[in-house]
């Protein structure tokens, strides 16, 4: 049996590394006085003991006394469409959920640490994972049980749930059969032999299981009590994580407060977090400038220069495992044609987009995977090379390629053709970029026009997932598991709704999921990316997201991992003015 971290190791190793162990240090009491003795002239006086300096009052973390008043103001970008995990496809929602719930294991700055569980182990054949839960409680005081994790997993695979990432969960025993309606959810390989034990069985050996899937609990009676209303308002939520949600003013802000029932509440220092939903980047930058928010990812070069010059701000550049892209609806009459998709991808002006529109902050995309993705010791981007430039070199005349595609569809002349592009943002920066791309496509392809539409991300994604689009734009982040991105394009996945129904590709991804050897996995990843980009051009990668994170010098403990969601668990402040 392979044993993993226990609660003691987790607290000593990880909290010691990331947040430190906080404890209250009170002023030492004065020594009791003793009656004085009259001095004798012939007897020299005894020197008094040196007075020890008083120890600092308050909580000390990593050698610093933290502020008595602990609060944080941040920008969460998109308005969450729902806080229902089973129906979420918005990054902003994922960030909130990571603070409201206790996954079995939490990724803390790249290190896997038991959260809902205090320890876990795998069977010798690698097919069974056993998690031993710690004592944790929902905010209503009821205990979090193993059945809460089982219910959550079953809900994700029930076909009627229509969970957008169900395909990623097929690695769980019977997951695919349940999602296809061939088996009952009770047959899923996630079980609870008792209230404190969760057993997960996989279809094949998955060493990266805990980097691939996030196992949150859900309280069945509470979820069913609210039904479709669950996750739409603050008062429908029940939390068991570091924070609870106390207010949700839609399209404005979400307020989180410390959850005293959380098992590790002692090491959650923030009492309150306000997450603002801001669509307009300039508004966010001004909020950082005037101190309304405590840290912010900045993408505008002018503001980067301004904030870099300030002595009260610290800048950290973080390259994310996130790709900014256009994607195509293969059920559409025109975009079912490979040549039309490739013509648009080749015509896209990435240089101007990255250097001018985005101020040189992100990195120009060369394929689906970013430069931070590795398979073992293999850097995927270096291994696979620049797939986009290879396509540009192969098709130097995108207008001619487009016309070939149109001829194959219905003979429409490019000069008479218009396509629709949708964007999940209403901000002025997004509109500026879209209008530039519109102008570029018209000129490079010789087409009549591009019809642009803008909406809040959650609303836009709902429309895209029903197939109501031709071309759409989003950025998508990966987990550390290289199979994750390829799973997004399998037949059953509707996460990025390109509608690529290809049994051979599905089998390739299935093989990748079962393969352990990094060298063999790398070959499969290369073939999968080649199918998505070079052969079929399902998406048009634009850039790889990078964050210039500016934070005030009093902020501590912000997560710097290129993966996962923003957890405020380890954040605190020291010396806030």
Image: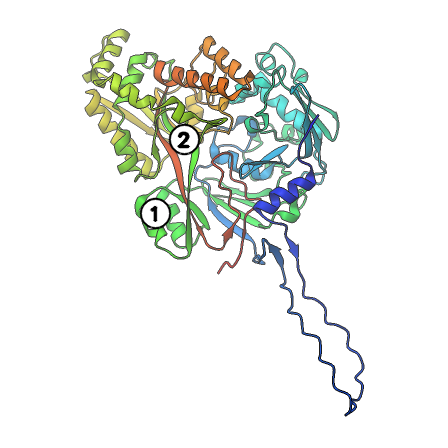
Question: Which element type, helix, strand or loop, lies under badge 2?
Answer: loop
In this view, the residue in front, 336 or 516, is 516
Taking the spot 39% from the left edge, 26% from the top edge, the residue there is 382
Seen at 80% across and 85% down, the residue is 37
Residue under label 2: 371
Residue 246's place in the image compared with 443, above or below, is: below
Q: Quadrant of the N terminus?
A: top right
For label 2, the crowd category at 10 Å Cα-Cα, with few meaning under 14, some 14 to 19 and many 20 or more, is some
Q: Quadrant of residue 526?
A: top left
Q: Which mark is residue 304?
A: 1
Left or right of residue 317: residue 105: right
The image position of residue 14, as x and y in percent, is 60, 42
Which label sits in the foreground, 2 or 1? 2
Q: Nearer the viewer, residue 307 or 4?
A: 4
Where in the figure is residue 248, as x and y percent of width and height?
A: 52, 42
**On residue 177, which mark appears?**
none
217 left or right, relative to 335: right
Q: Residue at x 69, y 39 (%)?
A: 7
Residue 503: percent from the left, percent from the top? 47, 9
Residue depicted at 44% across the width and 52% down the height: 292
Whether residue 419 is visible here, answered yes or no, is no
């Amino acid at each position: 049996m392979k044993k993993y971290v226990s609660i003691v190791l987790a607290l000593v190793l990880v909290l010691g590394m990331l947040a430190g162990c906080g404890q209250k240090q009170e002023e030492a009491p004065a020594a009791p006085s003793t009656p004085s003795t009259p001095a004798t002239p012939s007897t020299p006086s005894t020197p008094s003991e040196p007075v020890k300096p008083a120890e600092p009052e308050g909580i000390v973390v990593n050698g610093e006394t933290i502020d008595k008043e602990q609060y944080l103001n941040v920008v969460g970008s998109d308005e969450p469409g729902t806080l229902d995990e089973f129906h979420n496809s918005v990054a902003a929602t994922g960030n909130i959920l990571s603070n409201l719930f206790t996954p079995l294991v939490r990724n803390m700055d790249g290190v896997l640490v038991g959260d809902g569980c205090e320890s876990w182990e795998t069977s010798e054949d690698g097919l069974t994972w056993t998690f031993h839960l710690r004592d944790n409680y929902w905010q209503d005081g009821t205990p979090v049980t193993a059945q809460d994790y089982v219910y959550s997993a079953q809900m994700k695979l029930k076909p009627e749930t229509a969970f957008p990432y169900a395909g990623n969960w097929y690695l769980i025993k019977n997951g695919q059969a349940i999602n296809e309606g061939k088996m009952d959810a009770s047959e899923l390989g996630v079980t609870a032999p008792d209230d404190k034990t969760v057993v997960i069985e996989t279809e094949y050996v998955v060493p990266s299981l805990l980097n691939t899937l996030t196992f949150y609990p859900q309280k069945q009676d509470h979820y069913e009590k609210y039904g479709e209303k669950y996750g739409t308002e603050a008062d429908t939520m029940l939390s068991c994580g570091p924070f609870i949600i106390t207010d949700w003013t839609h399209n404005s802000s979400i307020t989180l407060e410390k959850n005293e029932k959380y098992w590790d509440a002692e090491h959650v220092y923030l009492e309150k977090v306000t997450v603002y939903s801001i669509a307009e980047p300039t508004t966010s930058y001004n909020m950082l400038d005037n101190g309304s928010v405590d840290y912010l990812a900045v993408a505008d070069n002018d503001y980067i220069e301004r904030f870099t010059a300030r002595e009260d701000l610290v800048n950290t550049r973080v390259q994310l495992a996130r790709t900014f892209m256009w994607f195509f609806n293969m059920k559409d009459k025109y975009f079912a044609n490979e040549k039309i998709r490739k013509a648009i991808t080749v015509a896209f002006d990435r240089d101007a987009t990255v250097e001018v529109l985005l101020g040189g902050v992100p990195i120009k995309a060369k394929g689906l995977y970013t430069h931070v993705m590795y398979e073992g010791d293999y850097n995927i981007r270096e291994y696979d090379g620049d797939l986009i430039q290879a396509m540009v070199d192969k098709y130097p005349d995108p207008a001619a390629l487009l016309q070939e595609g149109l001829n194959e569809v219905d003979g429409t002349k490019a000069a008479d053709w218009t396509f629709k592009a949708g964007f999940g943002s209403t901000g002025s920066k997004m509109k500026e970029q879209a209008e530039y791309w519109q102008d570029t496509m018209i000129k490079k392809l010789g087409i009549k026009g591009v019809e642009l539409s803008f909406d809040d991300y959650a609303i836009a994604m709902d429309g895209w997932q029903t197939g109501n689009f031709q071309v759409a734009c989003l950025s998508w982040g990966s987990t550390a598991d290289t199979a994750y991105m390829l799973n997004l394009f399998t037949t059953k996945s509707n996460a990025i709704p390109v509608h690529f129904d290809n049994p051979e590709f599905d089998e390739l991804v299935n093989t990748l999921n079962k393969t352990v050897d990094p060298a063999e996995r790398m070959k499969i990843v290369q073939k999968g990316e080649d199918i998505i980009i070079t052969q079929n051009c399902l998406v048009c990668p634009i850039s790889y997201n990078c964050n210039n994170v500016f934070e005030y010098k009093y902020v501590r403990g912000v997560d710097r991992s290129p993966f996962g969601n923003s957890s405020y668990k380890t954040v605190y402040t020291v010396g806030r003015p």
